[in-house]
């Protein structure tokens, strides 16, 4: 049901999805839906959180595999490559979590803000190899700018229907982010 909620959101737009759309896409009964969720928003925000957690886990695993602990640039590149592959392989889920989140009103905008701040903290902790909570305001702004670069590029490609091109430009995205973080 979680995946279905994100897919129908990408197809219809956040404000136009109803529970019937989710249960139809998921192939479950209304009763089954309400055994798990109180309403569409409850389902959608659980789906959003799950999708973001999975994405962050995949990015972190790629960074670790690339020895990001000793080479932050390699870790960043591997994480961005994982993100680009994920967006290209699951464009509807990515569209829902990167583009359609804004349609979730104040709750959606806050969830997006929290996700971006979380990513910026993880980026700082990895790049600077230090406690992100002790970063200067300038470093926090640099990390937010770096995250904004990649989310903006992903958003543009998702809206244009060219998400499949992202893996080919992941090195360029990494270079832009690294320049901001330098």
Image: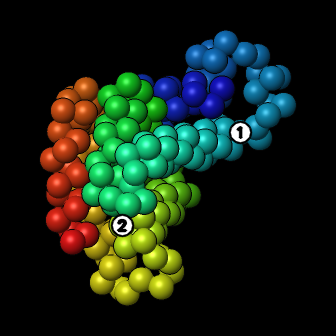
Does residue 162 appear to the left or right of 18 in the view shown? left
Q: Is residue 165 above or below residue 14?
A: above
Residue denoted by label 2? 127
Is residue 112 in view from this perspective?
A: yes
Residue denoted by label 1? 39
Q: Is residue 126 above or below residue 88?
A: below
What residue sits 33% from the left and 60% below the top? 72
Image location of residue 124, percent across then percent down: 40, 70
Is residue 150 in view from this perspective?
A: no
Q: Is residue 133 above or below residue 118?
A: below
Image location of residue 94, percent across then percent down: 41, 36
What residue sits 34% from the left and 44% below the top? 78
Q: Secondary structure at mark 1?
A: loop
Say which quarter of the image contains residue 129.
bottom left
What residue sits 33% from the left and 59% below the top? 71
Image location of residue 103, percent across then percent down: 44, 47
Q: Nearer the viewer, residue 130 or 111?
A: 130
Q: Residues within 10 Å of mark 2 (few under 14, many from 20)?
A: many
Can you say which quadrant of the picture contains the C terminus?
bottom left
N-term mark: 1 or 2? 1
Q: Secondary structure at mark 2?
A: helix
Say which quarter of the image contains residue 154.
top left
């Amino acid at each position: 049901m979680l995946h279905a909620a994100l897919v129908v959101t990408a197809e219809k737009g956040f404000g136009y999805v109803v529970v019937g759309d989710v249960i139809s896409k998921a192939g479950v009964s209304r009763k089954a839906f309400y055994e798990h969720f109180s309403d569409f928003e409850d389902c959608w925000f659980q789906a959003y959180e799950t999708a973001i957690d999975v994405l962050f886990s995949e990015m972190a695993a790629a960074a670790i595999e690339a020895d990001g602990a000793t080479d932050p640039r390699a870790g960043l590149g591997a994480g961005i490559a994982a993100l680009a592959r994920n967006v290209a392989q699951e464009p509807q889920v990515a569209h829902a979590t990167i583009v359609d989140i804004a349609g979730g009103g104040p709750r959606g905008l806050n969830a997006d803000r929290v996700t971006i701040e979380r990513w910026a903290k993880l980026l700082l902790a990895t790049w600077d190899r230090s406690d992100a909570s002790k970063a200067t305001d300038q470093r926090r702004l640099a990390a937010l700018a770096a995250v904004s670069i990649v989310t903006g590029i992903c958003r543009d490609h998702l809206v244009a229907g060219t998400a499949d091109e992202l893996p080919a430009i992941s090195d360029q995205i990494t270079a832009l982010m690294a320049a901001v973080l330098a």
